[in-house]
């Protein structure tokens, strides 16, 4: 009992010496309560809370810099747009000058191809937005009859006219185009006689600098060829094959005669074929 009494005295003395701060205790309790809430929300440890704080700080840093980055990108965009505008205007100026030359040359070529008294115009209009080829919207306009209004080439020309326009364009660009081989697949559509012969002459001109492969049913065009290949379909053992044979001079005459007369080749058609090939030789 005596020892307990001494212990009680000591305890009272100790408690009297303690500096109790109720406000500090309240602050500690609030802090502990906050930490417990954070644990429940972001993880059940102080380490998890710290990890979340670091992640949140990084996101905040990004957000704080976002406006600065946005302003920088807006400035860069304006600079790029200015360069694009300058380049597009330069391309547009060159395109307009080239269009004037093309309009004159295409009329000359089409006149040779028996398209008389036509109008041809390269319409260049500004688009709302830039594209990979600039800011111009280019359209070929044509009037094939006197008194008719200019209209889009693709809307008004016939098959034969389209063939001649394409050939005229190819002939013009052949002097500057680096393409080694050009293929004309049935360029004779809708044309015959003198017009077909002029088409052949145009292709012969292009062949001086480029290899020309022409698929044709026109005797006038075929007669001008330097090399003549006959393409036939044959059925062998229930399979269809395309057979290609290079023709010698005699066989070429026969093939031209067949194109002139149809299925029945006559002595007259053979003579006509010879005359046609001989007259075409002058264009080589």
Image (spheres, rainbow, N blue to C red):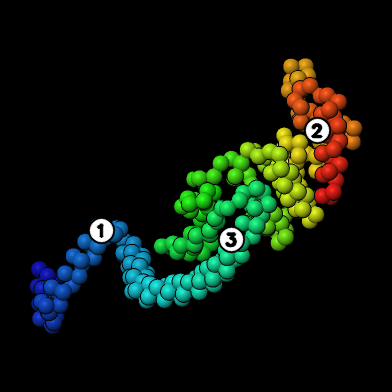
Badge 2 local density, few (<14 within 10 Å), some, or many (20+)?
many
Per the image, label 1 sits on a secondary structure element best described as helix
30, 14: nearer the viewer: 30
Direction top: furthest residue? 237
Residue 64 is left or right of residue 188, and the answer is left
List x then y, in percent, for residue 269: 82, 29
Residue 41's disc number: 1
Q: Which residue in the protein does label 2 denote?
A: 256
Q: Is residue 270 above or below residue 83?
A: above
Looking at marks 2 and 3 on the same chain, the residue that comes earlier in the sequence is marked by 3
Residue 32 is left or right of residue 225, and the answer is left
Mark 3–mark 1 distance (CA, rounded to whole Å): 76 Å
Residue 152 is left or right of residue 178, and the answer is left
Visible residue check, residue 245: no
List x then y, in percent, for residue 46: 31, 64
63, 256: nearer the viewer: 256
């Amino acid at each position: 009992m005596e020892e307990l009494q001494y212990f009680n005295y000591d305890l009272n003395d100790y408690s009297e010496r303690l500096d109790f701060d109720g406000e500090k205790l309240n602050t500690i309790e609030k802090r502990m309560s906050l930490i417990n809430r954070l644990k429940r929300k972001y993880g059940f440890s102080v380490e998890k809370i710290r990890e979340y704080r670091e992640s949140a700080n990084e996101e905040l840093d990004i957000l704080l810099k976002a406006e600065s980055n946005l302003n920088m990108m807006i400035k860069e965009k304006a600079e790029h747009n200015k360069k694009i505008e300058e380049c597009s205007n330069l391309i547009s100026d060159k395109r307009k000058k080239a269009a004037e030359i093309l309009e004159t040359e295409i009329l000359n070529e089409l006149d040779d191809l028996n398209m008389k008294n036509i109008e041809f115009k390269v319409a260049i209009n500004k688009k709302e937005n830039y594209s990979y080829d600039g800011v111009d919207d280019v359209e070929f306009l044509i009037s094939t009859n006197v008194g008719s209004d200019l209209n889009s080439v693709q809307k008004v020309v016939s098959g034969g006219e389209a063939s001649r326009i394409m050939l005229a364009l190819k002939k013009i660009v052949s002097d500057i185009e680096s393409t080694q081989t050009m293929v004309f697949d049935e360029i004779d559509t809708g044309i015959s006689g003198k017009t077909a012969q002029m088409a052949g002459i145009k292709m012969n001109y292009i062949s001086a600098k480029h290899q020309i492969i022409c698929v044709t049913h026109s005797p006038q065009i075929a007669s001008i060829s330097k090399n003549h290949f006959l393409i036939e379909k044959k059925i062998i053992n229930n399979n269809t094959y395309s057979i290609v044979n290079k023709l010698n001079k005699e066989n070429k005459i026969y093939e031209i005669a067949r194109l002139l007369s149809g299925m029945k080749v006559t002595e007259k058609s053979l003579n006509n074929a010879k005359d046609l090939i001989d007259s075409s030789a002058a264009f080589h």
